[in-house]
Amino acid sequence: MLTNIFAFFLKISPRLKRAVWKKLYQYLAKKYPTEEWTYMNYGYESSNQSTKIPLKEEEERDRYMIQLYHHVATAVNLVDKDVVEVGSGRGGGSSYIKRYLKPKTMIGIDYSKNAIKFSTKQHSVEGLSFIHGDAENLPLTNESVDVVVNVESSHCYGSMKKFVEQVYRVLRPDGHFLFADLRSSKEIDELDKTFSDAGFEVLKKELISKEVVNAMDAFHEFKLAFFQNMVKGWLKKPLNDFAGVKGSNIHKELSNGTMVYYHYVLKKR
């Protein structure tokens, strides 16, 4: 019931949508400052096991979430580039990109000050920094970065149009926008138009719902146990839905195609 009410309020007002998501992420970062929880995406698991990426032993627990970042961020060569992740959350993705994909600089930007505080403390990596900022008014100068990464964050924003225009503004000529997120299947044409209107060229548009559901299924037991141990009381059910465990609304809708998950590679024209 709570999850359905929550979803209803997110749909009625962009301003309310931003406010609710900000409150949620502020709360989660402050309430659960555990170093065992540094990724907040649904993950990616290819049916082709030969593509399995090598990870350090201590990172195997986060494999599925890391694989989503890897799939999105390796769409272009990041070596020696200035890269920004908008919606960096608890910082795991930005840390992975900096350590494994070797950009010159890596900045994580998030709307939650508590998340930025947590990320800065948790991820001490040379060339990696985290700053507080609004996706719809990025705290970056014009044409100052080579690549913008945005993973499973944009559905929280009040205005996708403003966000995409900001990404276009801060990218250098021929810069790349690496985007992945879920939407209602009815909203994809509108999303395509938003990218096009801003001036982006679509180099790749890839439906990855199946791979995301694969990861949800593979990680179900661990995720269920993790939240069972960490979260008590009324918040347990909403967080299980939020986390995408089997039986949750988001798992059902991605499985039946009501919701779809797309990966885009876009280039500033």
Image: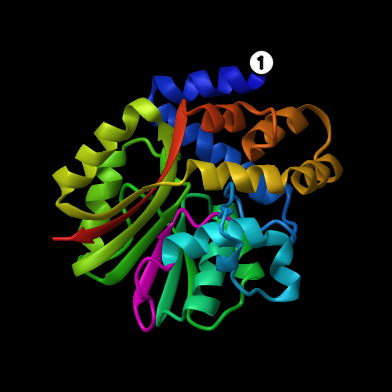
Label 1 environment density (alpha carbons within 10 Å; few <14, some 14–19, many ≥20): few
The residue at 55%/45% (across/down) is 212
Q: Any magenta on residue 85?
A: yes
- Is 33 above or below relative to 81? above
Q: Main secondary structure of the magenta part?
A: loop
Question: Which quadrant, please, contains the N terminus?
Answer: top right
Image location of residue 103, percent across then percent down? 41, 79
Viewer can see residue 91: no
Q: Which residue is mark 1?
A: 1
Name the one closer to the observer, 7 or 233: 7
**Helix, strand or loop for disc 1:** loop
The residue at 52%/42% (across/down) is 210
Q: Tell me which segment is drawn in magenta.
A: 74-91
- Is 94 above or below relative to 86? below
Q: Quadrant of residue 15?
A: top left
- Is 249 above or below relative to 159? above
Viewer can see residue 88: yes
Image location of residue 176, percent across then percent down? 28, 64
